[in-house]
Amino acid sequence: MKFIHGIAVTVLVVSLAACTKPTQVQPDAGAQAPATTTEGATTSGLGNTAGTAGSGSAAAMTAQQQALAALEAKNTVYFTFDSSEIPSEYLPVVAAHAAYLTKYPAAHIRLEGHTDERGSREYNIGLGERRAQTVRKALMLQGVADAQITTVSYGEERPAAEGHDEAAYAQNRRVVMVQVQ
Amino acid sequence: MKPESVHSRSLLRRVPLLAWLVVLLAGPAHAQLRLDITQGVRDAVPIAVVPFGGQDASAATDVAAIVANDLKLSGRFAPLDRADMVTRPTNGAAIRFQDWRLLKSDFIVVGRVEPDAAGQAVSFELFNVQTGQPLLTQSIPANERGMRAAAHRISDVVFERLTGIPGAFSTRIAYVSAEGKAPAQRYKLVVADADGYGQRTILESPEPIMSPAWSPDGQSLAYVSFEGKASAIYVQRLGTGERRRVSARAGINGAPAWSPDGTRLAITLSRDGNLDLYTLDLATQVLTRITHDEAIDTEPEWSRDGTSLYFTSDRSGNAQVYQVPLDGAREPKRVTFTNAYNARPRLAPDGESLALVTLDRGGYRIATFDLKTRNLRVLTDSTQDESPSFAPNGAMIIYATQAGGHGSLATVSSDGRFQQRLSSEHGDVREPVWSPFPRH
């Protein structure tokens, strides 16, 4: 299940200052608290300990959990080269996510936009965002509230497929719809 | 250890993350980028750099070898093989110029490491072999740890004396590496000397790191990190590792570029769902919007006088380079018209040309664009070249390319005549940026 678990993002900051022995600095008490920021961009994914839905038996799953599991299986829209238009074959996929979000107004979705590796990296961040925005607008046209949606663009930075051919590129031009509990 | 610990705690307050692990590097790093010359020039100037006196075989840093390697990697010089040196003079009076004329060296560098009042100094002399004329005589103080830096200084002054161009051998490069298979990659931000020596990782993360940019004083890097599952812009001081998150607004925070005076960053934000350019005053946090367009506006680069930005925009339907004045007096003006894709402009140190990525005969390649003549000159011939960055002397451009299915770094001289590849032992390397000149 691709729920956002309470992932402890570990970032190593390695100082250029020369030192004889590696030093591990334990996080102080303030840093253990759930992350909150004034601007909101880093709150998602930090301090959220949801994600138990996949662990119970099917019988124990609520209707919402079953619906989520079904959405999880179909959560990606693939795009053609240099396009941010949703191909018609993926409209039902988007509609299924829209139906869930309108049924559960407390639910939240994160749209992750991606591109293939061709072209400049920051420009591709823009293309990935444009794709995510297209899906966002499609969801909103089907009644999803703006506040239920966040977008992030990874550009070409998080390819789904290795390789430098059209087969890999087709896998990488995508928007992944991540239902967030 | 104490100052570092105190320091890390102040970082934790600034950047709230669940777990922090700060590692201070143990001794000098041995990891290295390997440089291979892939396209040489036939008219490289022959020069002899004789092993320096006062350095026996056990010396940790072979000064003459570093100088010879620097000059070779510049593409403009062909250093004489040591095995061909019949004599090894360590001062000008001991040079028999007829020997070196026979060896067809045009110039000769001799020198020695010797004690001085403060500790040690490296003295060196440069001569014209044909005339015997002394061209340079200098002494640089250096302890054993600073011997490599002293060698690069010698390369800098020898290069400038012979070419009229300041050497860029004392500079550094920063780049991003990605290790592991997608989608479970690990990302590192790495700093190394310009000759590939002494790679040091300054940030490591399970989420993407992008767009490193050197501050004009060479003391800090701005970069984009996705460590919070969303992009944010950070400024990190290299000496201490201290860093500050300067922009984490909703949506995209990307493409930081320093103003020439180092007080502001040009950045790209997606507040209305598409990318526009802003400037951010680092002291006051005042944000000023520069472009208003439904297109993608990104990859800003400051003009030398700090009054306008060059940037990439697809407002015409495909990516092209534009220029916009910061005072809002004029609409953005399109700069490039040749080829269907021109992106990521980087201004040459003299301000007269841009390096950029162009779509040329089906491949993404590095080109220079002359701002006066409007001439676009393609310098490379691969299909996935990107992220050009000028050396501070304007003589070379470092960029990212693909080699053997991996991301790799390469340099090309600004005239396109000389190319070399920098290969890394691990993973993909990309987004190289060349530091400014150090302030001695």
Image (spheres, coloured by chain):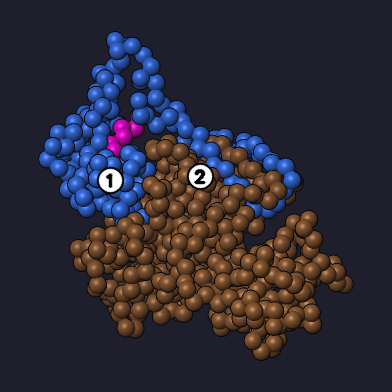
Chain colours: A blue, B brown
From where the camera sits, is residue B428 visible? yes
Q: Secondary structure at mark 1?
A: loop
**Image x and y of residue B151, in percent:** 68, 68
- Which residue position holds label 1? A165
Q: Give the farthest residue toward the left.
A: A88
The foreground one among A170 and A148 is A170
Quadrant occupied by the C terminus of chain A = top left
Amino acid type at mark 1: Asp
Q: Is residue A82 magenta?
A: no
**Which residues, given as a range, are shown in magenta?**
A176-181
Q: Residue under circle 2? A: B426
User: Where's residue B96, x and y in %?
Assistant: 74, 81
Residue A174 seen anywhere in this rendered image of the structure? no
Crowd around label 1: few <14 · some 14–19 · many ≥20 (10 Å): few
On screen, residue A90 versus residue B275, left or right, reads left
Q: Which mark is residue B169?
A: none
Which chain does tag 1 point to?
A: A
**Where is residue B114 drawn, in percent x and y?**
83, 70
Chain assignment, label 2? B
